[in-house]
Amino acid sequence: MTTLEASPVTIRLLSGITDPADRLDLNGHEAVHGSLRLPGRRDAGWSNRFIAALDESGLTGRGGAGFPTAQKLQTIRAQRRRPVVVVNAMEGEPASGKDHFLATRVPHLVLDGAALMARSLDASAVQICVARGSRVAARSFAAAVAERARAGMREAPFEVVQPPARYVAGEESALANWLDGGESLPLFRPDRPAFPRVSGRPALVDNAETLAQVALIARYGPEWFRGVGTQEAPGTTLVTVSGAVRAPGIVEVALGTPVWSVLAMAGVVERPAGVLLGGYGGTWLAGADVATPYDPASLGAVGCTTGVGVMVALPTDGCGLAETARIARWMAGESAGQCGPCVFGLPTVADDLSLLAYGRTRRRDIDRLWARLGTIDGRGACRHPDGVVRLVKSAISAFAADLDHHLHHGPCRGANQQSVLAFPPVGEVVEWR
Amino acid sequence: MAIARRLRVDPVACDAFGHCAELLPELIRLDEWGYPVIDDTPIPPRLVELAETAVRACPRKALSLHRVGQSSSRNLVARATDR
């Protein structure tokens, strides 16, 4: 923990990007990775080998849930109807920039992955979802689609679509609902079906980074993929690092790299007071635990999750409670407004946290907050409220000493510092279509 | 031997009328905002009839009964009682 050394850098997804502003067009992409070799349609032997390779690679979804990619693909393949493939590049998470990065730097890696998935399923179409307002990312994908068409690549038809830019709009059922002509609101799915449907067709929804990883595995094989990372969490992942670092941005790291080393790649200078992992519905890692390896098992052991690849370093003199209060407030505003426990519960939690961060709080207020968290957890149609509950619980644990200080002496000096977090404005007019 | 059943609320449909908690306080309490918190363990036989009454009484049809372990989203039990 005392050294500032970064781990050996593993560049895979970022191969060929020498300047941060580079965009690999189709020629550039093929110069780095070679051209994509797709088999003919309905080549069952190839599909079997492709899925077996994904299974062997151990790739898990990079959108936050971490579900095994091959397993999801198998479930869709077992359905009778021809499926569709949905590329999730919605990036509703304000602290994340990786979808935008992939879209604007290496769009063909994402499209290769989508084309491979589509071919293995004999899917009828690929829909690339980029949040409305993300013009640069949408343009880059559209240009990449046009380049592929000009090159005569024979693959499922691609279409770039732009659902509303809301936090919950990227949730799988909300995305499918919108693609079906409805609102981008999560659906109540009590039995958690394994996959959503679009126009009655099974939909394979994969995160943009997941698909980029698929493109690499198809070319270089599962053994190569497992060459870095841990036994349980192989490969690399993209992490958007921000907060108290000199060079905020996207880094590619092998899973299992200590959190501290990942922060070092973005130029962290001092031990942070805490690290926000996995986004606004993620968890706080205590400053004392920054040597923890960045993989689900290691983080799980200290009560944290990887979630979506995000790290925000809280400055040494920052206030984690105040930051958590701000996140809770913003997340309350991003509720889809459908379920009572979320609509009414999240603002209450935000109020409790604001009082804790900026006002006078007693121990029994903390007990009441804790009870409220328990009441809200698991009672929405989607996991939006659960994410806030998880984050607040982790803050109470990671910032236990600060909490004590606030209880006995009132707000700390860090509480009124400027936030290190980004909070996109919540529009006056809520648009869900 | 009766099939074990449990209650479930659709949080999107629920509008906090609170009838269910009045009719079945043994298994349903309201949170501080008036929304039902449901005991989703198997319903004891003595409460099954009351549970069915609560399901029928929901003005938003947000409450339903399910067989324990039922994995299909089709809700046969609730439909049978929902007349």
Image (spheres, rainbow, N blue to C red):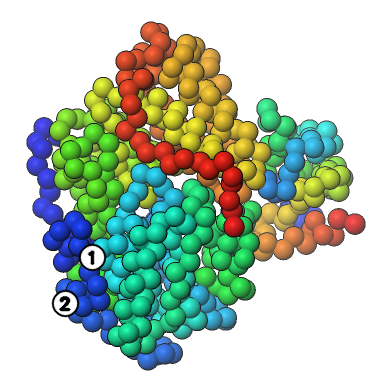
Image quarter in which the N terminus of chain A is found: top left
Secondary structure under the numbered disc 2 in the rendered image? helix
Please tell me how crowded label 2 is: few (under 14), some (14-19), or many (20+) other residues with Cα within 10 Å: few
Return the residue at label 1. Answer: A23
Residue A106 drawn at (x, y percent): 26, 66
Q: Residue at x 36, y 61 (%)?
A: A137
Q: Is residue B75 left or right of residue A254?
A: right
Q: Residue at x 80, y 47 (%)?
A: B60
The image quarter in which residue B37 lies: top right
For residue A364, say whether it is visible.
Answer: yes
Nearer to us in this view, A5 or A338: A338
Q: Distance between the Cα atoms at labels 2 and 1?
A: 13 Å
Image quarter in which the C terminus of chain A is found: bottom right
Give the number of callouts. Answer: 2
**Amino acid on which disc 2 is placed:** Ala
Above or below for A323 versus B39: above
Above or below for A281 versus A357: below
